[in-house]
Image (tube, helix red, strand yellow):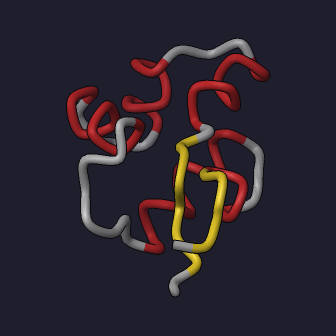
């Protein structure tokens, strides 16, 4: 079994700070489509650097970007 992300929490974190996905994409220097793929978990692994950048702008810890569980 692996401890893996099971749900992306970025939308609720954006709502908490009153910002949009477009704002986060601009701040993180990525396309809105790429951010959408991250939110829908259509990627293998997100780089630590990218996760850190997203967490910084969302004012949270890297582990807070996802809900985690055993699979």
| Picture mark count | 0
In front: 23, or 10? 10
Left or right: where 69 falls relative to 5: right
Across and down, in percent, residue 34 comes to 24, 39
Q: Quadrant of residue 40?
A: top left
Q: Residue at x 38, y 71 (%)?
A: 47
In this rendering, is residue 36 above or below 54? above
Q: Residue at x 69, y 64 (%)?
A: 63
In this rendering, is residue 48 above or below 16? below
Q: Residue at x 52, y 70 (%)?
A: 4
Q: Quadrant of residue 14?
A: top right
Q: Residue at x 45, y 70 (%)?
A: 49
In this rendering, is residue 6 above or below 33? below
Left or right: where 18 falls relative to 20: right
Across and down, in percent, residue 24 comes to 48, 30
Q: Given the current orientation, which residue lies at the most extreme bottom position?
A: 1
Across and down, in percent, residue 52 comes to 56, 63
Across and down, in percent, residue 7 comes to 54, 46
Left or right: where 42 falls relative to 70: left
């Amino acid at each position: 079994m692996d401890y893996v992300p099971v749900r992306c929490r970025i939308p609720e974190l954006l709502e908490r700070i009153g910002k949009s996905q477009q704002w986060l994409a601009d701040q993180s220097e990525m396309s809105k489509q790429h951010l959408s793929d991250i939110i829908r978990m259509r990627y293998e692994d997100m780089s630590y650097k990218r996760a850190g950048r997203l967490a910084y702008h969302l004012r949270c810890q890297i582990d807070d970007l996802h809900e985690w569980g055993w699979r």
